[in-house]
Image (tube, rainbow, N blue to C red):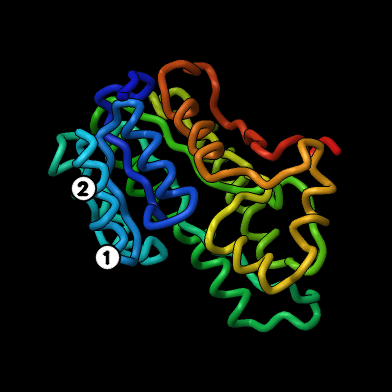
Amino acid sequence: MISDLLADKVVLITGASSGIGAAAAKVFSREGAVVVLAARREDRLAALVSELRDKGAEASYVVGDMSVSADAGRAVDFAVAEYGRLDGAFNNAGIGGDRTPLHLMTDDVYDTIMDVNVRSVWNCLRHEITAMLAHGGGAIVNNSSVAGVVAIPAAAPYIASKHAVVGLTRAAADEYATRGIRVNAVAPGTTRSEITVDWFARNPGLEERVNSLTPQGRTAEPEEIAEAAAWLLSDRCPFLTGAVVPVDGGFVNH
């Protein structure tokens, strides 16, 4: 059943081939959005778009690496060319990382995490804001993490990258607040995705330990993060910008 939270809004979703991004494609479509999906894995994007269209949604995809500015620009340009404007964006592309003490972390690991988690958001924001300024405004949600609000051991580059996403969110929100563009972030707690399932499989007992630190005592489902992002992209919160919304079962308050 299609609802109206995002009725007729054209929304770009990056990192849309799996996890929170794929869940967002389904949730946003259900809420009435036209969705443009961007990621590197074309086979998954094509399958997801086909699934959405079978359910009556309007959906398209663009293959690209958002850490490359030209690819981010191409995704935004495609949305505008195909649908006439860009109303919203969920900058979700990102990666995790192995748990390694800071003094043992290598340059290539740091560079990869910062490129995917920060440069991707930076690239997308620049192109999305340009398009939104040309068409009367819009709303952007960046996917940070509870690691963008607090620290966890042995994950320094990941923590730095997610704090940077929070910084970009607040900077953009402040700069474009009077120009019709709202910019907010979600900060998910541990969420069930391919990355976390693999992480838990390689570290027996880790999920239980993490959940013991979460007042709700469980791992989130990707759809729960997507629901929060949908609300932030909607017209139901017009006075909300520069916020970092924890969707974490109470973790940051524990």
Relative to 27, is 202 above or below?
below
As helix, strand or loop, the secondary structure at mark 1 comes to helix
Q: Is residue 164 found left or right of 39 in the rendered image?
A: right
Q: Which residue is mark 1?
A: 43
Mark 2 or mark 1, whichever is nearer to me: 1
Residue lying at 34% horizontally and 30% vertically, measured from the top left? 30
Dot label at residue 60? 2
Q: Quadrant of residue 210?
A: bottom right
Dot label at residue 54? none
Kind of residue sitting beneath label 1:
Asp
As helix, strand or loop, the secondary structure at mark 2 comes to strand
User: In x, y percent, where is residue 20?
Assistant: 49, 48
Kind of residue sitting beneath label 2:
Ser
Residue situated in front as seen by the camera: 153 or 162: 153
Q: Is residue 51 found left or right of 149 in the rendered image?
A: left
Q: Quadrant of residue 156?
A: bottom right
Residue lying at 32% horizontally and 43% vertically, measured from the top left? 12
Q: Is residue 108 found left or right of 159 in the rendered image?
A: left
Residue situated in front as seen by the camera: 194 or 98: 194
Q: Is residue 90 found left or right of 203 in the rendered image?
A: left
